[in-house]
Each structure stands twice: as C-alpha cells, then as structure tokens.
C-alpha cells in the first residue's frame, strides 16, 4: 500500500445505524491522496451509506447513529466542533442521477461561489471557465453559458454537476455511480475525466460496473452485507484476491 503520509481519508471501526438497523459494521480503511478508490459490492451492501458517511450526508436522515471514527487529513469529521457546511465544501458529491439546477449553465457553476460570498463578475467568470474546463465541458458549452442547463445531454449534465462541485475548491470528490444512467460514449468521457481529476483531487466512487472499477480506480474496496470484505490495489482485487467471496463477486458468480 502507499506511504502512510499519503493517507487522505481514514476510518476506524466505523459503524452506522439507521434506527435499529445496522448498515455498516466495523469499517477500517485508509484511502490515499490523489488516488481513485472504487467501492464495489451487490445492492444494499453498504457502499452508498459508506460514501455518504464521508461528508456526513447521512446526518440528514432521521435516526442515524454512528460509532468509530472517520478522519480527513487527521481530523475527525464527526467531532462536534466540525463545521458541516465547510466539510461539504471540501468533500464534494456527485450523484447517480445528474441534478442540475433549473438555471443557466453559468449560474449552475457560479451558484456555490456566490453562496460563499463571491460577487465580483470577473472572478466568477474565471471560476466558471476554470471549473468547466476541469470538467472537460468548456468547449461544448462556452457559447451556451446563458442557456438552461436542462437543455444539455445527460452526459453533459453530469459533467456540469462535476463542474459545480469543483467551483467551490473541494479536495475530495465522492461519486455515487456517476455514469450508471449514461450511454457508453458519455460513460467513457466521465471515466477519462476521473483519470484527469485525480491529479488534483482524491476520488471515491461507488460503481456496480466491474469493468469500470477496474479501469478507473487505483484501489478497490469490496463490501458485502455492511462489512468490508477486502481492500487492496485494484489490480490485486481483480487478479489475485485473498478472499474467495471477493473472487466470486468480481468474476460474476454472485451479486
């Protein structure tokens, strides 16, 4: 595994409960700076619950309880002194279904910076262009900035949602099946984008697509029934897993 100084996100004995139902059990894992970590496993195994725990999105659900720790850069994000709004700026989230606002392309990307108090037009222009370029979308929309974002294709909308995340300068991107609703061409663009983005961001992605996990990630975590069965370099998980259960899942024998 990587040098411990490169650990960006770390969990220790992390449990998560929805009321009386335990969704995650004793998750201990280190995820590395400027790498892509894929979370795989059958539906209902805890992947998305774990992803949402990394920016406290689960806090929005009644009856959620946690035990154990989640640290980012050594800081416990569940500490009572942590500003959750600031945390969610640092840890951006891209959802399975693209969810652009019913606003112009420009206003979608400028939304976060404006909420954070940036009003200067030249500064906003610069942020919007930089974010759209980072999301590999600028050339496609630079003449449509005033058009409704809802007029973009599905793949463009998803990249716009990524640009919207990037506009508030996060250092971690969480992606919950970002390409599952897209056609193969749009999926390829999202995968290329993930590869480019890891130069500047730490990325954690949930995917049902084994080939996608193998293509885009450096590390893979296999979840089953709320537990982390195995975590290793992606190449190892797919070619020489330690656990029989992992082998059966990645070769399609169950799940």
Image: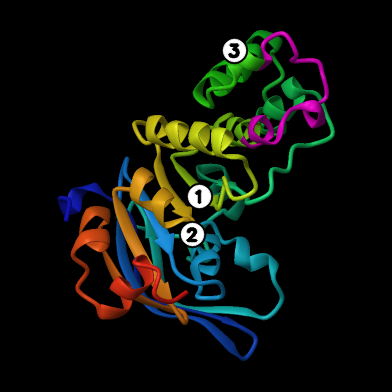
**Residue beneath disc 1:** 174
Front in this rendered view, residue 155 or 32: 155
Task: Quote the CA–CA distance across marks 2 and 1.
Answer: 8 Å
In the depicted structure, whether residue 133 falls above or below residue 31: above
Assign a secondary structure to mark 1: strand
Regarding residue 68, the answer to whether it shows in the image is no
In the depicted structure, whether residue 139 falls above or below residue 48: above
Q: Horizontally, is 130 left or right of 237 in the view?
A: right
In the depicted structure, whether residue 24 falls above or below residue 217: below
Snapshot colouring:
rainbow
Span highlighted in magenta in the image: 141-158
Please name the residue shown 81% across and 31% down the image: 150
**Residue beneath disc 3:** 139
Do callouts 3 and 2 mark residues in contact (Cβ within 8 Å)?
no
Task: Quote the CA–CA distance across marks 1 and 3.
Answer: 25 Å
Please name the residue shown 73% across and 20% down the image: 106
Q: Position of residue 45 (x, y in %)?
A: 50, 75
**Residue beneath disc 2:** 54
Front in this rendered view, residue 98 or 82: 98
Is residue 155 shown in magenta? yes
Task: Quote the CA–CA distance across marks 3 and 2.
Answer: 32 Å
């Amino acid at each position: 595994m990587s040098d411990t100084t490169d650990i960006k996100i770390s969990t220790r004995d992390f449990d998560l409960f929805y009321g009386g139902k335990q969704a995650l059990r004793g998750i201990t894992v280190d995820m590395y700076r400027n790498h892509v970590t894929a979370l795989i496993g059958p539906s209902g195994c805890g992947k998305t619950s774990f992803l949402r725990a990394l920016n406290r999105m689960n806090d929005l659900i009644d009856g959620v309880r946690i035990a154990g720790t989640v640290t980012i850069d050594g800081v416990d994000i569940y500490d009572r002194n942590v500003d959750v709004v600031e945390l969610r700026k640092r840890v951006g989230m891209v959802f399975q279904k693209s969810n652009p606002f019913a606003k112009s392309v420009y206003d979608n990307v400028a939304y976060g910076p404006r909420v954070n108090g940036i009003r200067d037009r030249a500064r906003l222009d610069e942020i919007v262009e930089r974010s759209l370029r980072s999301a590999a979308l600028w050339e496609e929309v630079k003449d449509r900035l005033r058009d409704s974002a809802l007029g973009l294709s599905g793949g463009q909308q998803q990249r716009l949602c990524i640009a919207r995340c990037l506009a508030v300068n996060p250092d971690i991107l969480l992606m919950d099946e970002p390409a599952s609703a897209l056609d193969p061409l749009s999926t390829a663009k999202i995968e290329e984008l993930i590869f480019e983005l890891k130069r500047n961001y730490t990325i954690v992605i949930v995917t049902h697509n084994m080939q996608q996990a193998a293509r885009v990630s450096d590390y893979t975590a296999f979840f089953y029934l709320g537990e982390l069965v195995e975590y290793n370099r992606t190449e190892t998980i797919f070619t020489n897993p330690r656990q029989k259960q992992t082998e059966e899942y990645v070769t399609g024998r169950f799940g």
